[in-house]
Amino acid sequence: MEIASVPEAIEWQAQHMERAGSPNNARVLKALLAVLETDTATGRRMANWQGLTLEDAMPLRIAGGFHYLLLTGEEERLADIYAGRMTDQAAIDAMVVDIVERHDHTLLPWLDGPPQTNEAGRSASVMAGLLWLSGKLGPKFELVEIGASAGVNTMMARYFYDLGGTTAGPSLSSIRIKPEWRGAPPPQNPVETVGIRGCDVAPIDLTDAAQALRLKAYIWPEATARIARMDAAIAMAEKMPPDLVRMDAGDFVEERLAEQQEPGVTRVLFHTVMWQYLPPATRERITAMMEAAGAKASAEKPLAWIRVETNRATFRHELTVRYWPGGEEWVQLAEAHPHGAWVEWQGAD
């Protein structure tokens, strides 16, 4: 899907939010169209944005900044919009413009980098993929996550899952992932995670209060369950941080593929809603490395790739899987809500 202009990117993202169940946050995004017309540093930078505004997720960058202003108490007026008490778009436009004018220098740096929407709910799709792969390759997995952000999903082996009645993970976990399940449940196969490590070019330390607050700011304000889940993940990380390193995704994949693989354990590369942020050259490099490694994979040392990424035409996330040997083509197993609220299973046993 091609986005031709900044206003079109803002409109697309607002529609995406509405369809994903966040209409109040969408109203704030729509007000960015009015901000484009202002003589603020934030407005000028957005209006003159260079490159792929949709892949850059520029509107979501600034949306995090607005939520941050509310979380810090600097702009409590936003609470009326996020709670749905204020719905008149013209009035919201005027308020958002005033907020940008008042907090221009606070908001401007939020445009410097992509949003870090690290969401434990997305691991429901990853676990569903592992349950399916277990029936193809065996129950033991070594997981490799790229674009791991704060490592919330790098801790996925510590969560309990109820996926349409199919369960996995420790039953006493403080984080319970139970999305609305549509369609048949995934197969009830055993899943044993023998290791999991993640990377990010700019990892967030969940044990640092300022960094954790910034991560929470990227959560859509209406998503109270997600915010509670993030608080639980922060508490979990304080007891045992995720195994997370600062590294380029391509370099990390190369390093992990070069590591000695334990016989009987499937090595799995996975990522959730980050592929669009990688430079095309990095995507091509990772794909080439995975295919080369897949050509050398064996029944004793299998390889798999799980993606949970956005289809911009349907506004849904798609769970797709490849594995070697025997399943070299991508298979779509499910569609999912952007933050894991529901999963619609399409796979077969």
Image (cartoon, helix red, strand yellow):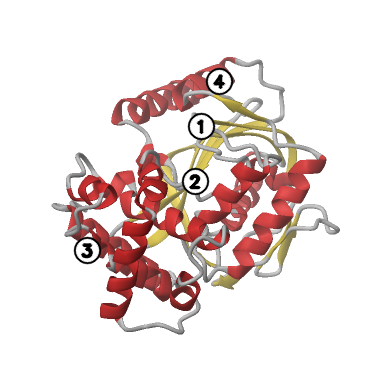
Residue at the location (40% across, 57% down)?
63
The type of residue carrying mark 4 is Leu
Residue labelled with disc 1: 202
Would you place residue 145 above or below residue 175 in this image? above
- Residue type at numbered disc 3: Leu
Q: Is residue 260 left or right of residue 328?
A: right
Disc 3 from disc 2: Cα separation: 23 Å
Q: Badge 2 local density, few (<14 within 10 Å), some, or many (20+)? A: many
Viewer-proximal residue among 74 and 267 = 74
Labels 1 and 3: the sequence-earlier one = 3
Q: Is residue 259 visible?
A: yes
Residue 68 appears at what percent x and percent y? 51, 56
- Which label was assigned to residue 116? 2
Of labels 2 and 4, earlier in sequence is: 2
- x and y, in percent, of residue 138 in the image: 69, 40
What is the distance, in whole Å, between disc 2 and disc 4 at their CAs? 26 Å
